[in-house]
Image (spheres, helix red, strand yellow):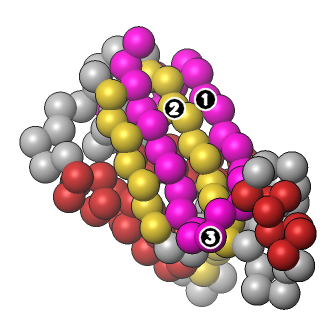
């Protein structure tokens, strides 16, 4: 079973949990929750009759960051040819965590099933994230 998904829009990395000092309650920031819900919605729209993966899982993620408008034409081509990589936020580990948390209990039963995991950051004309989930 293979699920492939492209989620267009600004990429948001997983933010640190926050603490409400009045209640002592720990919560996930709204920006992170909204992005996780967006990924989940995109998955459910593309695969309305999905079957949860119950075995081990391999996940490949490519985060395509938009090329800045002020970039020279020479560097634009280098970025598109993957000669220049984005060394900007969000961090690669936070991208992986937000994707895993978004698809946990949807595409797969639990994220402890993930046995292979690759993440890359590249430049593109459109900001998006590509996700490939595969049972193996």
Q: Which residue is mark 3?
A: 125
Q: Are marks 2 and 1 in contact (CB under 8 Å)?
A: yes
Around disc 1, counting alpha carbons within 10 Å, would you say few (fewer than 14), some (14 to 19), or many (20 or more)?
Answer: few
Instruction: Decide whether the magenta segment is chiefly helix, strand or loop.
Output: strand
* 136 in relation to 99, above or below: above
Asked whether 125 falls inside the magenta stretch, the response is: yes
First in sequence: mark 3 vs mark 2: 2
| Residue under the point 77% across and 80% down | 68
Mark whose residue sits in front, 3 or 1: 3
Q: Quadrant of the C terminus?
A: top left
Around disc 3, counting alpha carbons within 10 Å, would you say few (fewer than 14), some (14 to 19), or many (20 or more)?
Answer: some
The numbered dot on residue 37 is none
Asked whether 120 falls inside the magenta stretch, the response is: yes
Q: What is the CA distance from the residue labelled 3 to the residue labelled 1?
A: 25 Å
| Residue under the point 33% across and 36% down | 3
Q: Which residue is mark 2?
A: 59
Q: Of helix, strand and loop, which one carries label 3?
A: loop
Which range is magenta?
109-136
Q: Which residue is mark 1?
A: 117
Residue nearest the observer in this picture, 134 or 15: 134
Residue 91: tell me if it is visible.
Answer: no
State the image coordinates of residue 72 (x, y, percent, origin top left).
Answer: 88, 79
Around disc 2, counting alpha carbons within 10 Å, would you say few (fewer than 14), some (14 to 19), or many (20 or more)?
Answer: many
| Residue under the point 55% across and 35% down | 60
């Amino acid at each position: 079973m293979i699920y492939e998904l492209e989620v267009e829009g600004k990429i948001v990395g997983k933010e640190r949990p926050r603490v409400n000092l009045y209640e002592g309650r720990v919560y996930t920031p709204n920006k992170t929750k909204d992005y996780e819900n967006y990924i989940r919605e995109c998955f459910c729209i593309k695969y309305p009759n999905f079957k949860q993966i119950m075995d081990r899982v391999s996940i490949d993620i490519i985060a395509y960051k938009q090329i800045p408008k002020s970039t020279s034409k020479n560097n634009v081509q280098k970025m598109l040819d993957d000669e220049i990589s984005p060394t900007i936020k969000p961090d690669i580990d936070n991208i992986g965590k937000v994707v895993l948390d978004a698809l946990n209990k949807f595409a797969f039963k639990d994220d402890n099933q993930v046995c292979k995991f690759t993440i890359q950051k590249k430049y593109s004309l459109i900001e998006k994230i590509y996700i490939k989930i595969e049972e193996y």
